[in-house]
Amino acid sequence: MFIRRVQALCLVIGPTLFALSPMFWIDGRYGIVGGMLIAVAMVPWVFGLLGEYDRLRPHLPVVSGLWMLLVLIGMFGSIAFGLQGFFEGVLGTTDGASPATFTGVPTAGALVLLLAGPMFPAALVVLSIFHWRTRLAPRWVASLLALAAAMFPVARVARIDTLAVIADLLMLGTFCVIAWRAWHADRAPVISPS
């Protein structure tokens, strides 16, 4: 019960830290504080999503496990983007020169940022589908989560501060509802057959 409640709380802490990051953008780039917030936010957020995995597993045993793999790949990509912004700020390369340096290592750059990066919003879209199907959250929450997850990468690629703030606040709102339901979920102990 205690861990379940900590995980529910983390479903609020992670998106809250993430939602603060656009407040620290510098000319559409994460910067030191924004990048740090994104990287740090992923740890509690994914811990909270592990609780969602526990809630989904009885309903969707196979696909929820594959979804958790997608979450972990997305976590890696999001932390990579956050650290990129952090180190751009530390090294003073906030003029867009940093992405140009990946031309020397196209495969590694593609794997770390271009492939892993979009996996976290994709995992959130899948979560919205799971919540829609299982009704672990109201369908309006699942719909808003899908919308927020779609807005998430668009705002970052386009570097539109206002859109990023709207997407992040919408994401935070949906996760507050999901966290509330997870906090109050009654779970009977699962007894495995001997």
Image (tube, grey):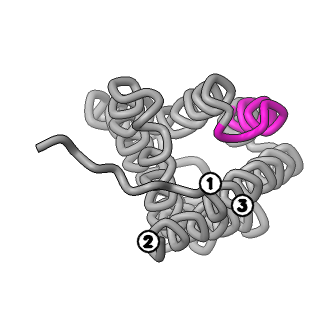
Q: What residue is disc 3 on?
A: 180
The kind of residue on which mark 2 rests is: Ile
Q: What residue is disc 2 on?
A: 3
Task: Pick whichever of labels 3 and 1 is earlier in the sequence.
Answer: 1
Task: Pick whichever of labels 2 and 3 is earlier in the sequence.
Answer: 2
Q: What residue is disc 1 on?
A: 95
**Separation of disc 2 and disc 3 at Cα?**
14 Å
Q: Residue at x 76, y 48 (%)?
A: 174
Label 3: which secondary element: helix
Tags 2 and 1 touching, CB below 8 Å: no
The kind of residue on which mark 1 rests is: Asp
Label 2: which secondary element: helix
**Separation of disc 3 and disc 1 at Cα?**
41 Å
Q: Residue at x 78, y 67 (%)?
A: 23
140 falls in the magenta region: yes
Label placed on residue 140: none
Q: Which residues are magenta?
A: 136-149
Task: Pick whichever of labels 2 and 1 is earlier in the sequence.
Answer: 2
Horizontal side of 165 relative to 35 (left or right) equals right
Residue 186 drawn at (x, y percent): 58, 57
Q: Quadrant of the C terminus?
A: top left
Q: Residues within 10 Å of mark 3 (few under 14, many from 20)?
A: some
Residue 66 drawn at (x, y percent): 34, 29
Camera-nearest residue between 22 and 29: 22
Q: Residue at x 51, y 48 (%)?
A: 52
Q: Residue at x 71, y 41 (%)?
A: 137
Residue 187 drawn at (x, y percent): 50, 55
